[in-house]
Image (cartoon, helix red, strand yellow):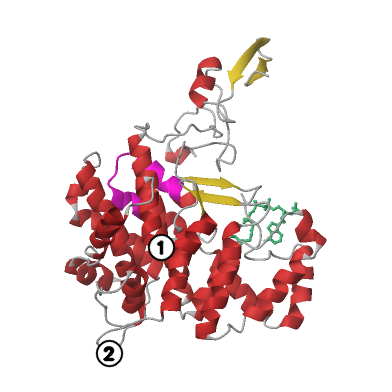
Amino acid sequence: MAETITITDNRTGEAIEVPILNGGIDSAEFAKLLPGVWFYDPSYGTTAGASSAITELDGEAGVLRYRGYPIEQLAEHSTYLEVAYLLIHGDLPTTEQYDAWVHDITYHTFIHENVRKRFMEGFHHDAHPMGILVSTLAALSTFYPDAKDIFDPESRYKQVIRLIAKMPTIAAGAHRHSVGMPFVYPDNNLDFCSNFLSMMWKVAEPHYEPDPVLSHALDVLFILHADHEQNCSTTAMRVVGSSHADPYSATAAAAAALYGPRHGGANEAVIRMLTEIGSIENVEPFIADVKAGKGRLQGFGHRVYKNYDPRAKIIKDVAYEVFEVTGKSPLLDIALKLEETALSDDYFISRKLYPNVDFYSGLIYQAMNFPMEMFTVLFAIPRISGWLSHWQEMLDQDSRIARPRQLYAGPVARDYVDVVDR
Ligand SMILES: CC(C)(COP(=O)(O)OP(=O)(O)OC[C@H]1O[C@@H](n2cnc3c(N)ncnc32)[C@H](O)[C@@H]1OP(=O)(O)O)[C@@H](O)C(=O)NCCC(=O)NCCS
């Protein structure tokens, strides 16, 4: 069977054979064959915006792999920093490469004092930490003018290191500012996640040592959130990066995309929903309301995963490890009852609606004392390694600037009318 599609142009009666490449149609090829005909696809649901070798996602089969490695194996055996190396470089590091990578990241965790004093502390006292994060990332571009050398491998590496390393510092700083607590400097004797927890929670003790179970749980969550191929924020990163903006400006755009409740805010919606349900007895009437079209079951369903979200199972196990230390979340029983009821109900089964990554991540963050405003920030910390790997890949592909067509739907040409005659 030929790997082509035959399209008949009914305007001319001409039949055109369009080649299929990797399951899709190359738009450049199509444009040559049918000049002037565009695809109308505002949410890119049927458009591949990039060719990428980073993350493989098969929603039907419930598969998620980074650079070929199954997410389950990475969550069990790897660390977030090793996964970040894998995403950025394409392969797992040797011991030597890993040590150098961890060293470089550990020694770039500090931020310039003026970033803290002039920018972060300049925000209103109750500023949302995600707003602080987005703006601080953009401000960093003014501190590192060398970042404009995007085709210089040494400069590029430096910015990648800086961004991955400084995310926890900025994230924790944003939280401390929003609750009126003094900024805590990084402790480079701690591992990546423990250092973040220290910057979040340290009060007067000379050295903060978090519970290793909680550091490890956070590390697993960071692995699960590090990349997810061409989602909204990664697409923003690639689109802004295609204009050859510096990586700080591009990551600020990606973080802004993540800020939206349709992208990074679903786990917060889960907590609000569970709180609203309030008790196990209210689960069944709540499900009945959802089935009657009154709202959605937050943390259920996914645009891509139509079998199950492979991250959800891992995260459920992590939740139990965390609850061993923190005590059970009062919302857990409601969540379990909700999951059990929905998974045995034909409404959810027939629509292939399963718990997604957000169903349990909010419960974990809440048990670890993170305020809800920090949930999206916690998503952004590891996702920066995904954004940066896509940014590098896009630059290496020497792609053209992103510039879609539009279908013009406005008025036809008309003449200007003087204001007194309108
Ligand atoms: C993630 C989500 C936006 C994907 O949406 P989508 O792929 O566009 O799916 P659709 O909106 O086309 O939904 C398909 C059907 O399932 C239903 N459905 C989808 N998600 C649902 C949910 N969470 N609760 C109840 N019904 C749901 C829709 O009502 C629709 O039913 P219909 O065919 O009778 O009209 C959607 O599942 C959702 O809103 N989930 C809750 C929010 C969430 O957890 N987001 C985080 C994603 S990681």
Label 2 residue SS? loop
Residue at the disc numbered 1:
79
Residue at the disc numbered 2:
204
Residue at 24 percent of width and 87 percent of height: 206
Name the one closer to the observer, 297 or 168: 168
Q: Residue furthest bottom?
A: 204
* Rendered view: 415 above or below 189: above
Name the quarter where the N terminus is drawn: top right
Residue at 50 percent of width and 63 percent of height: 76
Q: Kindly identify the amino acid type of the residue bearing the numbered disc 1.
A: Thr
* Rendered view: 406 above or below 362: above
In which of the image's four quarters is ligand 1 placed? bottom right
Tell me if 374 is positioned left or right of 113 in this view. Answer: right
Residue 260 image offset from top left, x and y in percent: 49, 59
How far separated are the C-alphas under marks 1 and 2?
29 Å
Tell me if 411 is positioned left or right of 219 in this view. Answer: right
> Magenta residues: mostly which secondary structure?
helix
Q: Kindly identify the amino acid type of the residue bearing the numbered disc 2.
A: Ala
Name the one closer to the observer, 318 or 256: 318
Residue at 42 percent of width and 34 percent of height: 403
Q: Nearer the viewer's eye, disc 1 or disc 2?
A: 1
Magenta-colored span: 234-252
Residue at 70 percent of width and 83 percent of height: 279
